[in-house]
Amino acid sequence: MFINWAQQEITLKIVYYGPGLSGKTTNLRYIYSHIDASKRGELITLNTKEDRTLFFDFLQLEVGKILGKKPRFNLYTVPGQVYYAHSRRIILSGVDGIVFVADSQRERMEDNLNTLLDLEQNLITMGRTLQDMPLVLQFNKSDLPNSANFELLQQRLNFYRVPHFNSVATTGIGVFETLKMIINQVVNHIQSHA
């Protein structure tokens, strides 16, 4: 959380985290293309060898004021590959809420679990845990024929019984529902700890 006193804005950071090619980038691109251009910043892409990190910010006036300030949200993705662990830790620094984008394909379950464990370990190094963090799970690619059923995804990945959504990020199914839920969780978390 960062407060810009001159602009009377409070900036909150939401990170989309998940294994490589799970749909984090697709989520952000979909959101960016469907937000009023006058309320969003520029979409910035940092390309790495096999993945990319995206970032943009937007004003979310519909949630009202937070601590008397207009809310601005910074949305980030992290590179999914394991060898970008340092980059992921840097992007997580100062995070206010996390969307974990799981790949629903059965053969990606181990990747999802390993990445969820990596996320928890990174948070612990920062003195936080998933248990005390606003978190939403998104089961992406739920339209594919080899996707695991919803109950199995819940059982294997939703340890803390957090809000969850099936999604198809390429078409926008579940994308804004996930975003609205994490925004609500972040706002409630900030207000309850103020």
Image (cartoon, rainbow, N blue to C red):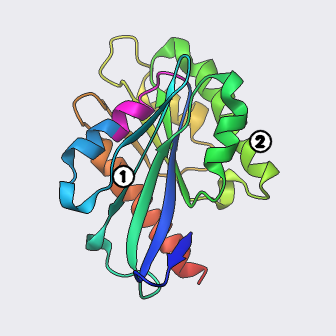
Left/right placement of residue 47 relative to residue 61 reads right
Quadrant in which residue 36 is drawn = bottom left
Left/right placement of residue 169 relative to residue 81 reads left
* Residue type, mark 1 in image: Leu
Q: Give how far apart the Cα atoms at labels 1 and 2 are.
A: 24 Å
Residues shaded magenta: 20-28
Which residue was labeled with disc 1? 179
Quadrant in which residue 170 is drawn = top left
Do we see residue 12 in this rendering? yes
Q: Is residue 16 above or below residue 21?
A: below
**Residue closer to the observer: 53 or 82:** 53
Q: Is residue 175 above or below residue 67?
A: above
Where's residue 172, x and y in %?
A: 24, 36
Which residue was labeled with disc 2? 121
Where's residue 30, x and y in %?
A: 27, 38
Secondary structure found at label 1: helix
Point out the tag, 1 or 2, that comes first from the N-terminus. 2
**Residue closer to the observer: 98 or 80:** 80
Where's residue 12, x and y in %?
A: 49, 65
